[in-house]
Image (cartoon, grey):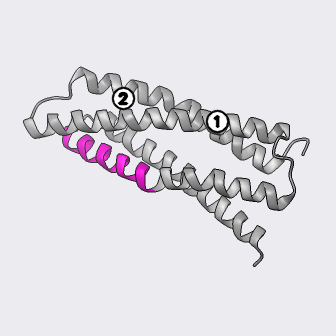
Amino acid sequence: MDAYLLLKWVHILSATVLFGTGLGTAAHLWMTHRSGSVPAIAAATANTVRADWWFTLTSGLVQPASGAALIWLGGHDPFAPWLSVAYALYAIAGSCWALVVALQIRARDLAQEADASGQPLPRAYFIAMRAWYGLGWPAFLALLAVFWLMVAKPGG
């Protein structure tokens, strides 16, 4: 297998891990949140934070590195309009993700405190989750658009 095909495989695999982990953990956390079970929420938020550090962060770093190598090896113009839009969308998704992780850590800590003390979830938990939910949508839609750009390469 030549370097370009190997990098393309790594890029596609890391995109799959990035998107799949994001979608899977978000769905799981949202369903658990909706259950209202404090012990389940404490566990789900902890596991979501772990998954984000292990899978989302690592694949999120592999994406631009492998993408830059593919641009160079493939002879693409790194400033082509479709790539410039993809960079901007990826930056939006990454910025949302950074905020989401901070909110997940806050929600995890609040849920674990509530679980340990046998108390209901505090108002701050629900505020964090509302913001978490709101920030998830632009990240999700931005990554969908990046996928489309990578496949369609409009004008490129």
* Mark earlier in primary sequence (2, 1): 2
CA neighbours of label 1 inside 10 A, class few (<14), some (14 to 19), many (20+)? many
Residue 60 locus on image (x, y percent): 56, 50
Q: Is residue 88 above or below residue 63?
A: above
Q: Quadrant of the N terminus?
A: bottom right
In the rendered view, does 87 fall on the left or right side of 16?
right
**Residue extending farthest left:** 117
Report the residue at 47% width, 36% height from top: 98
**What residue sits right under mark 1 in the picture?**
142
Q: CA distance from mark 2 to mark 1?
A: 20 Å
Specify whether residue 43 is painted magenta. yes
Residue that label 2 marks: 129
Asked whether 58 or 112 is in front, the reply is 58
Q: Residue at x 64, y 64 (%)?
A: 10
Mark 1 belongs to which amino acid?
Ala
Q: Secondary structure at mark 2?
A: helix
Amino acid marked by disc 2? Met
Residue 97 lies left or right of residue 89; in this view the side is: left
Identify whether 91 is placed above or below 59: above
Q: Which mark is residue 34?
A: none
Asked if residue 118 lies left or right of residue 66, the reply is: left
Instruction: Tell whether position 129 is magenta.
Output: no
Q: Position of residue 46 (x, y in %)?
A: 29, 47
Q: Is residue 20 above or below residue 92?
A: below
Q: Residue at x 19, y 43 (%)?
A: 39
Q: Quadrant of residue 112?
A: top left
Residue displayed at 79% across by 54% down? 71
Residue range in magenta is 37-54
- Picture coordinates of residue 134, whole percent (x, y): 48, 26
Residue 127, given in percent of the width and then of the height, sits at: 33, 22
Most common SS among magenta residues: helix
